Image (cartoon, helix red, strand yellow):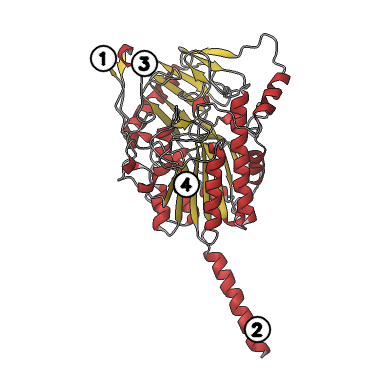
């Protein structure tokens, strides 16, 4: 009898171990719209904003200080995240559908972009779905004007809130931005006063509760902190009071000239701060739910942004500042492309580690699929999964960006390349280059193109080869 009980116990133990080994990891990918590198306190301690939950996530995971968006505006980066391909290859090098009110007055004509992520492209969601995962999209999509290109047709089992637009809409009697009614065909209106960031999180929490025994990919794409800047109710008064107690140095400039625009230098927008706080609080809710449901030891959580913070515009009025980084959303300076990135997961060997390893949006496609144990075709992304679990840092040759359109931030068509610590920005109107050494000059203040002409010419040549290789299209003289 004892022998039978022992064998039974042994069988149950083996079965339990096999089940644990075979249990597939869950993935929660959180994309925050327009969140700047310096909006997160763990990155920039002098920030006006408060992000305790993101800071705690960083303390439990891995924080990247030199993570990059694939592009300085949203749609191209979102397409790169979904496919692992450079935006050039996808024909999406501007926000969809793009608009330039000064087009007739421009000295050069810019290339036409595609208005959708083509259905022929293989998405991250499609790869997870074909391998038995539940796939959920919540929030901002902005990768197709027509419904046939929305998340539910791109590999996601559920689409809550994702449609053609890139920001909460303001239309009298129909939609009230971040407050219900939303006027969103993929999101029902909530009770009066409901805040969109809270609502998207509630939808996410419900899906987590319903799928505790099934592997899932939850892609939570907040509309925050994109314009319109509408305060989150809970913390707005707090930040108004905080701003009143701030002591700015007498005579300190709040804006500086950036081309034809102005870059904001001081974080002091209470409404924007409340939006950051609401996002942070809701990320905390997601992390708590995973822990409460016993899923945190088998779930990877990734948080990043689609481009830098909106700090540069024609004239004044931008909501945030990017700390020591130059310019912001829309620009290929560091302020426009360097973004927060925090990764938390069961395989992190050194929680709290901070790394300066350069990574970019395309890298998530092979990295997440590799963690899940799925095969995939190589593309422009670089798999850094082994680095997350204590392996060697992957070697990277260059990173490059291509924005051949004009933007409302006052950016003029150009491209950029980073090779080691060297960074070059090429302007298509003037044909001129700017050269920086990021190690010595992370704020890109000292242009070395004239003092190091051979380096600038060499980097420009490499940039053009990379653009040609990926199918980049160029502006033309009118």
Question: Contact (CB < 8 A) between labels 2 and 4?
Answer: no
Tell whether 113 sits left or right of 300.
left
Local packing at callout 2 (Cα closer than 10 Å; few below 14, some 14-19, many 20+) is few
| Residue bearing mark 3 | 431
Q: Quadrant of the C terminus?
A: top left
Residue 236 image offset from top left, x and y in percent: 64, 28
Residue 96 image offset from top left, x and y in percent: 37, 31
| 22 lies above or below 116 | below
**Which of labels 1 and 4 is toward the front?**
1
Which quarter of the picture shows residue 427? top left
Give the mark nearest the N terminus, 2 or 3.
2
| Residue bearing mark 4 | 383
SS label for mark 3: loop
Give the mark nearest the N terminus, 3 or 1.
3
Q: Residue furthest bottom?
A: 1
**Which of labels 2 and 3 is toward the front?**
2
Local packing at callout 1 (Cα closer than 10 Å; few below 14, some 14-19, many 20+) is few
Which quarter of the picture shows residue 21? bottom right
SS label for mark 4: loop
Q: Residue at x 31, y 33 (%)?
A: 114
Residue 118 image offset from top left, x and y in percent: 31, 41
Q: Residue furthest top?
A: 251
* Residue 181 seen in this snapshot: yes
| Residue bearing mark 1 | 478
Q: Quadrant of the N terminus?
A: bottom right
Local packing at callout 4 (Cα closer than 10 Å; few below 14, some 14-19, many 20+) is many
| 302 lies above or below 114 | below
| Residue bearing mark 2 | 6
Give the mark nearest the N terminus, 2 or 4.
2
Q: CA distance from mark 3 to mark 1?
A: 15 Å
Question: Contact (CB < 8 A) between labels 3 and 1?
Answer: no
Give the mark nearest the N terminus, 3 or 4.
4
């Amino acid at each position: 009898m004892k022998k039978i009980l022992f064998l039974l116990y042994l069988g149950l133990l083996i079965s339990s171990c096999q089940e644990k080994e075979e249990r597939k990891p869950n993935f929660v990918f959180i994309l925050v719209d327009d969140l700047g590198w310096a909006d997160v306190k763990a990155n920039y301690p002098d920030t006006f904003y408060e992000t305790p939950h993101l800071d705690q996530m960083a303390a439990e995971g891995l924080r990247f200080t030199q993570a990059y968006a694939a592009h300085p505006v949203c749609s191209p980066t979102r397409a790169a995240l979904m496919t692992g391909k450079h935006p050039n290859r996808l024909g999406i090098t501007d926000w969809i559908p793009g608009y330039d009110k000064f087009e007739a007055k421009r000295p050069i004509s810019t290339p036409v972009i595609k208005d959708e992520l083509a259905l022929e492209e293989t998405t991250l969601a499609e790869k997870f779905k074909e391998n038995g995962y539940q796939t959920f999209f919540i929030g901002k999509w902005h990768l197709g004007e027509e419904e046939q290109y929305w998340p539910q047709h791109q590999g996601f089992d559920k689409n809550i809130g994702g449609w053609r637009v890139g920001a909460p809409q303001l239309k009298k009697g129909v939609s009230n931005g971040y407050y219900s009614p939303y006027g969103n065909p993929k999101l029902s209106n909530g009770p009066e006063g409901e805040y969109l960031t809270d609502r998207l999180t509630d939808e996410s929490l419900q899906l987590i509760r319903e799928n505790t025994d099934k592997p899932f990919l939850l892609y939570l794409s907040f509309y925050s902190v994109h314009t319109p800047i509408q305060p989150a109710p809970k913390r707005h008064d707090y930040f108004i009071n905080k701003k009143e107690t701030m002591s700015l140095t007498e005579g300190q400039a709040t804006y500086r000239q950036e081309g034809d625009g102005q870059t904001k230098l001081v974080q002091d927008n209470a409404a924007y701060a409340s939006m950051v706080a609401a996002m942070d609080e809701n990320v905390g809710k997601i992390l708590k739910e995973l822990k409460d449901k016993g899923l945190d030891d088998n779930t990877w959580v990734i948080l990043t942004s689609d481009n830098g913070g909106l700090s540069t515009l024609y004239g004044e009025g931008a909501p945030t500042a990017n700390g020591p980084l130059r310019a912001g959303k829309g620009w290929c300076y560091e302020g426009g492309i360097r973004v927060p990135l925090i990764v938390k997961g069961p395989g992190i060997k050194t929680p709290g580690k901070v790394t300066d390893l350069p990574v970019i949006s395309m890298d998530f496609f092979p990295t997440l699929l590799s963690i899940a144990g799925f095969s995939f075709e190589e593309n422009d992304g670089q798999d850094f999964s082994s680095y997350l679990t204590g392996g060697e840092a992957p070697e990277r040759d260059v990173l490059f960006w291509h924005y051949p359109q004009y933007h409302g931030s006052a950016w003029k068509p150009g491209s950029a390349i980073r090779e080691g610590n060297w960074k070059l920005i090429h302007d298509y109107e003037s044909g001129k280059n700017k050269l920086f050494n990021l190690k010595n000059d992370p704020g890109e203040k000292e242009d070395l193109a004239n003092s190091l002409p051979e380096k600038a010419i060499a980097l420009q040549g490499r940039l053009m080869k990379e653009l040609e290789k990926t199918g980049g299209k160029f502006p033309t003289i009118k």
